[in-house]
Amino acid sequence: MLDRPPFEDIYREYLGRIYAYVRAQVGASADAEDITAQVFMNAYQAYARFEARNTTPSAWLFRIARNATLDHFRASGRRERLRRTIEHQPMAEEDPAAQAEDRIQYRALLGQLGELPERQRDAISLRHSGLRFDEVGKLMGCSEDAAKMLYHRALKALREAVQKEGV
Amino acid sequence: MSDKEEDLELQALQRQLDDAFETTRPRTGFEDELWLRMQAGRPAPRRFADAFSALLQGIREVPAVPMAAVAAVLVVAVGIGILAYGGFGHRGGGAATSAPLSQSGASRDYAGASGTFGRVPTPVFSGVPKSSQGPEAVADTASGEYLGPVQLTWAGTLDLTITSVPVFRYREPSTNTADQFATALGAVLRERPAGFLGSYSAADYTLKIRGTVQSPQASPAFFVFAALSMPPIDAAGAGPKDLADIFLAQHSLSPQWTYTIAVDSSGDPVKVLYQRQFDVPGYAPAYLIEGSGKHYGIEVDLSNNRPVLVSGLLPMNLDAAPYRIVSAADAIQSALASSGQSASATPAPAVKLTQAELVYVLVPAGDHSFYEPAFLFSGTFQLNGKTATKHVLVPAVDPSQRTP
């Protein structure tokens, strides 16, 4: 068996990326925190079974994150998700750090991304979270070429949405 | 739009997306909170603002002497139904045992002159009633706390045959104190993260040591986070208490103070709590309680016979001095005086206090902090069809020996 890096190293390296991926999917920072927490809880428990020779930590973690996000949507439903995105007043936004985050100019862009169809949103999120197209394809159950095509279609859809909304 | 223009636009959008994903990060503190929670093996509730956050609010402010005027009476947590740890933290929660020794450095007979420390700071508790809110507005079902105003009556007995009890004082631990403790355990200093005196590495665990926390009040503490390489404790037929005993003994962490043990086996991890007590001459041992009213001391969390988190009071030398305490009648009167007025149309619920016991509470006070005696009153009442428990804390030290 190949040596595994300490889980803490993986945790520190990927926490931010996983959070960003999840945040792009669910919109609300509070939901993103919950799901990210669940991702790493699950990963921590499963790490003893992680085989470094079969997959990269990145692909492994994003698979867990993707499943956790899908579980979230299944549990809450699209309507509920939208309601929470609109109405939710997360605790994070009460502290200065979160308020600073709110000022980030890309929030609106991620908001537009969140409105894309699920597979398009996923393709962009995974790609811009640092995964290669072959990894994106594997996670989404399609070939590398299909992942590229899906991504570019999604990118155009996002551009149109951005232009329409003037983000 | 030409293909070239479109390509340029898409490339710009890609750069924006790269930046967006690079700059979208969780709020400050989330990373450490989650890591600590993972080490504790706890489920991830919504938000991260439960009592465990005390551990994370490690940024040590310069503690100020509390303002007595704010808290002549301390009103403590109230559990709707049960406290956060279920039946945890009550005398009946587990088999009672006791350790043979008192706290290192604290004289058992407390023979010093009364009031040796001068006027001691009056304890402050942050959970005072929010009189501007109705009771339904302050029932916090997530934490089990109820902070709304209540109308209190006394229907129990409080017999006191003692007129003075010891107050304990400790010097705020330094990085040297923490380093010595870690070295004794065989752990090596790794860094000094914000909020902690030190973070140390050992073969199969990480040790972190924290000083006194002003708010929410928390004693100097150590935290042992097991690495994945930490082996299960191999002891055939041993129960959680036995396993915890073995682990603490193996790591020289066995409490050197009087305690009782409570075991919470309701979930994973199983929690074994060594509930610290202070010996009070002429009275039963008095529990140390935290702001929520829960007992604390050392907690060993076990998952599949494997310790995942051990946290507890950092051993410290305590000085002790007897202090005159208020009479039972005065204590009861103070407790009842904490009744609050509801500002809403809904009247404050009536609560009949039926029990009282002497306990100890932490009083942070700068270079030297204190464990001071207090009376813990409790009673139950019905709120929205559920049984709630109300706790009221009253300082026990006579007001003439406390700062105003």
Image: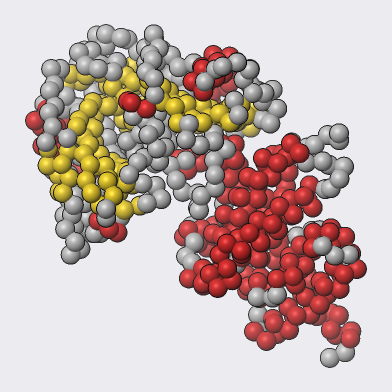
Image coordinates of residue A141 in percent, x first then y, are 82, 62
Q: What x and y, as percent, mark residue B210?
A: 50, 31
Question: Could you tell me if residue B157 is visible in this image?
Answer: yes
* Residue B196 drawn above or below residue A152: above
Q: Height in image: B400 above or below A112?
A: above
Q: Nearer the viewer, residue B403 or B345?
A: B345
Above or below B169: residue B228 = below
Q: Quadrant of residue A2?
A: top right
Observer-nearest of A84 and A46: A46
Residue A6 is situated, as x and y percent measured from the top left of the image, at: 74, 36
Residue A16 image offset from top left, x and y in percent: 67, 53
Measuring 65% from the left and 75% from the top, which residue is drawn there? A115
- At horizontal 31% and vertical 30% (from top left) the residue drawn is B361
Coloration of the structure image: secondary structure
The N terminus of chain B, quarter of image: bottom right
Q: Say which residue appears at 61% left-offset and 50% top-offset.
A: A38
Task: Say left or right for B331 vs A51.
Answer: left
Instruction: Tell me which residue sits at (16%, 49%) in the image.
Output: B350
